[in-house]
Amino acid sequence: MVGPLPPERSGIAEYSAGLVAMLRDLGLRVDTVTNADVERAGVKQVIDDLRKADAVVYQMGNHPIYHGWMLPLMARVPGIVHLHDLVLHHMVAGVLNEEQRLTGDEYASVLGKWHTVSEVKSAGLALRCGKPIWNTDDVVHFPLHQVATKFATEVVVHSQYSADRIIHEFPWLPVTVVPQLYPVVASHRVRERLSTIALMGGGQMNRRFDWIVQALVAIAGDLDHPLTLEIAGEVEPAVQRVLEGLAGIDNVTLVNHGHVGDDEFWNVFERADLMIALRQPTMGEASAVVSKAMQAGLPTIVSDQGWYAELPACVKKIVPTDDCPQVLATLLRQLSQDPAAFAHWAEACADEAGRPSLDPFAATERYAQLLRGHRVLADFRDHVADAVASLKVDIDSPLASELQRIDVRTSLRGDRWVNPALAALADQELDSHARIVGGTVGPYPYNGPLPDAGFLGQALVLEHDAGVVAPSSMISLRVELTNDSDCQWLSPLGHAIRPFGIYLGHFWSSADSTHPLAEQPRTWIEEAVDKSSSGIHVMKVRAPDVPGEYHLEIDLVQESVCWFKSRGFVPARLVVHVEAAQP
């Protein structure tokens, strides 16, 4: 198990320590490697030890000091990457800055592996102007988790949200979702009235303390008893200024503890009647304090996005928009004025805490099964081998760049898949850089709108099981695209949205409404559909969150131009019933 451990002040260190202890209780031998171990024994010795292990797990997060040192080890000994934060941009920037390489070409080079030329230029300009991407909300669009997942032979995450994002980039990687749970949490107590609200784990601007302050100011005059807001953890100066908005407000008392030790942390936790944990934007992370709150049966309010959106129904969720302060104020007002309703909610949270889904040892058993089976040395190699051998590795395939890392993968001693990969290279007559021998590769063919006749064709959904689905579930569809035009349809390389690129897209609309919902994420056309031909493409769509009858429309789009249906294309249409599971 490679990563930080206590006494390092890291949430991932605490999680790793609990996980190691529980795995050992299940009979696994778990050796740990920290940065101090590397400094003491040396990189060569650590690498030699890692190569002898049955499995290597890297506990990867976004802090450059706690996690940056792991990247060279991952490059030499690929293993299971447990990705705690989807956004690793801050870690990458911190490592480059520590090595005095941030202002050179290296930053642009890292971004250029995963982003378009225009995006790299935009990030470089932001850095030169003193407003780097990692200090803005735009950082979620530049996650750079690929610096770690590119070395992964398997990935572990805490949410389907993160799993979907990783699978989109590396569809051949096994990804397992394991709940983030802890062996020691606060004891349960009966909560019959809202009096104390806790904000735990420190304060950064994206935790939206400003929304919480606005909500408390709005309801202060309506309270029939005082509320106490306790903050445990260091807060940024900007957040401290936001908290000054509570000064002199009747019925609301602020207790800002700052950094606290373990005992005081648990004291605050146990005093709390309610925890609020908002995030905007989310970095794809899971919250340790929210996990502990659920395990302790502590009522919690979170932002309805990312990992938080997947939490049990007893966790109240608020959409993180500009209306959030008003919605939060309404909810807090109701909870404070109706003790019976609050007590009923607290009882539901306590009931959820006793369910198997929040049992940390059940989650650890799932982790242990993953390690025992060690799919890394079987499923991954076989999956990639089959894909490489069957696809024949056309130069326009995204897999071409993956083959350039074949020297990294061979460190796994995986001849079962390396040999078929090399055979495919020979059949395709590619050189060692995955380039066609004697051939040339041109740029993406479209830098302007297609001609009017270039949009003609139709989409048809083949056999599927999307008639009745659960809310927010993922639906896999096989879509046949028939191209009746004189133009080839394909998406740009690199899985990036570019002007004039062609993509599959879809809309959901409610059957009882004429207003379509917002456009959904694009799906890349990996295999070109030649003119006067057809091809089958697999796309995954997420069902709406609210039960009901919906129409699903699947169309093609030329980015920055139009949807194909406006130029004569016939989109595919389905009626889908979204039904919640029966209790």
Image (spheres, rainbow, N blue to C red):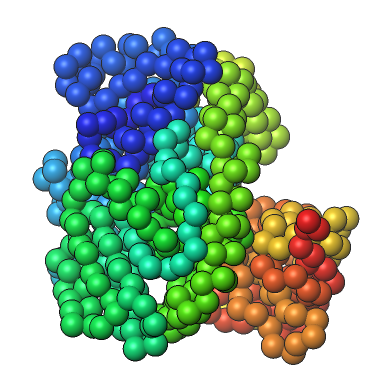
Q: Residue furthest left?
A: 100
Image quarter in which the N terminus is found = top left
The residue under the point 65% across, 80% down is 517
The front one of 236 and 473 is: 236
Q: At 65% from the left edge and 31% from the top edge, which residue is drawn?
A: 383
Asked whether the viewer can see residue 570, the reply is yes
Q: Residue sitting at 32 percent across and 35 percent down?
A: 13
Image x and y of residue 372, in percent: 58, 18
Residue 137 picture quarter: bottom left
Query: In this picture, is 580 found above or below 557?
Result: above
Using the image, determine if residue 136 lies above or below residue 334: above
Front residue of 446/104: it is 104
In this image, 226 relative to 583: left or right? left
- Residue at 18 percent across and 51 percent down: it is 259
Relative to 527, 367 lies left or right = left
Q: Is residue 455 left or right of residue 228?
A: right
Q: How many marks?
A: 0
Residue 8 occupies which quadrant of the picture?
A: top left
Q: Quadrant of the C terminus?
A: bottom right
Q: Position of residue 521 (x, y in %)?
A: 59, 66
> Is residue 530 at all visible to an observer of this figure?
no
Occupied quadrant, residue 462: bottom right
